[in-house]
Image (spheres, rainbow, N blue to C red):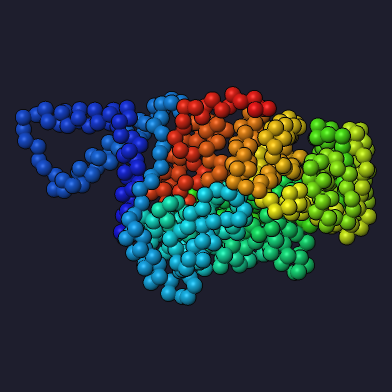
Amino acid sequence: MQSSLSYRTALAASAWRTLRGTPALRHAATLGSRWNSSSASTDRPRPQPKNSNAAFAFTVGSLLSGAIGYYVATQSGQASDRASAELNSQYGSQEDFRNAIEELKRLFPEEDTVTTDAEHLEEHGFSENDYHPGSKPSVVVYPSSTEDVVKIVKTAVKYKMPIIPYSGATSLEGHFRAPTVGGICVDMSKMDRIIEIHEADSDVVCQPGLRWMDLNETLKKQGIPLFFPLDPAPGATFGGMLSTGCSGTNAVRYGTAKAEWFLNATVVLPSGEVIKTRRRARKSSAGFDTTKLFIGAEGTLGIVTEVTIRLAPLLPTNVAVVQFPDVRKATEAVSEIVNSGVGIQCVELCDEQFMKATNIYGMSSRKWPEKDSLFFKFQGPTPRALQETGDIVKKIAQKYGGTGFALAKSEKEASDLWMDRKNALYSSLALIPGARGWSTDVCVPPSRLPELVYGTKEDLEAHGIVYTIVGHVGDGNFHALLLFSNDEELEKARAAVGRMVHRAIALDGTCTGEHGVGLGKRDYLYEELGEGTVELMKTIKKAVDPLNLFNPGKLYPDTLKPEAAKKSDLVPHA
């Protein structure tokens, strides 16, 4: 009851702060005073209602309803006319947090469900995958069901304690860092069951802690010729994949998590309420697509506890590699190949630095020409279809200066060729023994990719940064790995990532095609999306999570700074 009351109180306070001082509320107050004046104009005493509290509540409710209606009806839609939707940053005291932890231990007496072990906190507050500031949670809880998550959320609301969802921990932008005050890390790894497989409908119902590779392996073992085609990092789970709007090398054929691959989700809201976003039907035009409200929200609007995902037919594939004179010729070839309609499942651009790194790494079955190259994965129902696709791609590649076209002659050779692409991280690190790498991604319209790549290469070489570039060229999405060996070089890499983002946005692109926003890229959203869109996102966040308990500090940027608006004027070769 107390937590529910706290949530409702916060919601009411949030509404009041939003409306306070607006023409809407002043207008409603004027109407109210006129009503009172009119009612009091007679000299006769008015009879008092039996329940004055009810009358007062009715009056206030009417005024607020009128204010809200007037507010919505009279807004011009210009961002400059709206108050900035700042998010709450006031949480419970450290004593409140200690009480919350004790309550969680009473709610979950099972061993290893609630832990404050230093090693566990360290693991859940830092990452070897990125270089954003680490911050440990106060406690880690391992729920096993939706009901468990509800208990955790209600405890968090009661004590005003932040909640940080934790999934596969493969993210690269600091998505699961706790705020500096601490918080409850909700580790979903125990919720990894496949609930139902509907082969006839090509869908699966599962829990969020299930890894996509484990699902595909299960389908294979059961002889079901279907698979889940989105392919981010190998350890990624469905909860994290939904929350970051992920994709991978297959996106040129199958799109991203923001397509229709997630049919529905069961979500625990910050109020503790459980919703299911829609039924299992393949399509629906019934109201808002609330599933997509949570895709890419990075755990800031709710905790996903169950999903229904679509599957695709598992078709035969083959792999080919071809070299080009430069990135522009390779990109032009890909545009014509994709538009020809042949069966392309993946097409990856690997720059000459990457091919050099692959040779140094020494795990490949061949010595590669150190040129800008394309790795293709073809898809088709028969060997003949795959061969025809290979013939068409070879012909188009040659038209744009492609040489050394190699089509795998066996499944093993295809696997070996593709492994050279998948070994990108380890191969790239071989360029500087003992170095570490900062991995980042940006995305632009495919035709603008050469400008982005050339501008980035020019910038990195001017600053003496060793790098490799790998791109999902069919989507205009590319990943750069910037190598460094000390703190000074780390800061140079950090600054280069910022320039890369500004360059991509200036080319009508995005600060992230796959990795998500998290801590690392939230400051770029005003530049990319505009003030109106960002403030709308914040307004939704405040409506759903007025206490700002769910994954605070991620996704939503702080108030727009005047100088931030100038960044969009940067030229591509900044």
Question: Residue at image x 74%, y 43%?
Answer: 468
Total numbered labels placed on residues in the image = 0
Residue 121, visible in the rendered structure: yes
Question: Residue at image x 17%, y 32%?
Answer: 36
Pick the front one: 289 or 3: 3
Question: Residue at image x 68%, y 44%?
Answer: 482
Pick the front one: 400 or 424: 424
Question: Residue at image x 16%, y 48%?
Answer: 51
Pick the front one: 261 or 52: 261
Quadrant of image for the C terminus: top right
In the image, 487: left or right of 75? right
Residue 510, visible in the rendered structure: no
Q: Which x, y percent locates residue 501? A: 62, 35
Q: Which x, y percent locates residue 524? A: 55, 36
Q: Which x, y percent locates residue 451? A: 73, 30
Pick the front one: 264 or 335: 335
Quadrant of image for the N terminus: bottom left
Q: Which x, y percent locates residue 531? A: 49, 31
Vertical placement of residue 323 versus 177, above or below: above
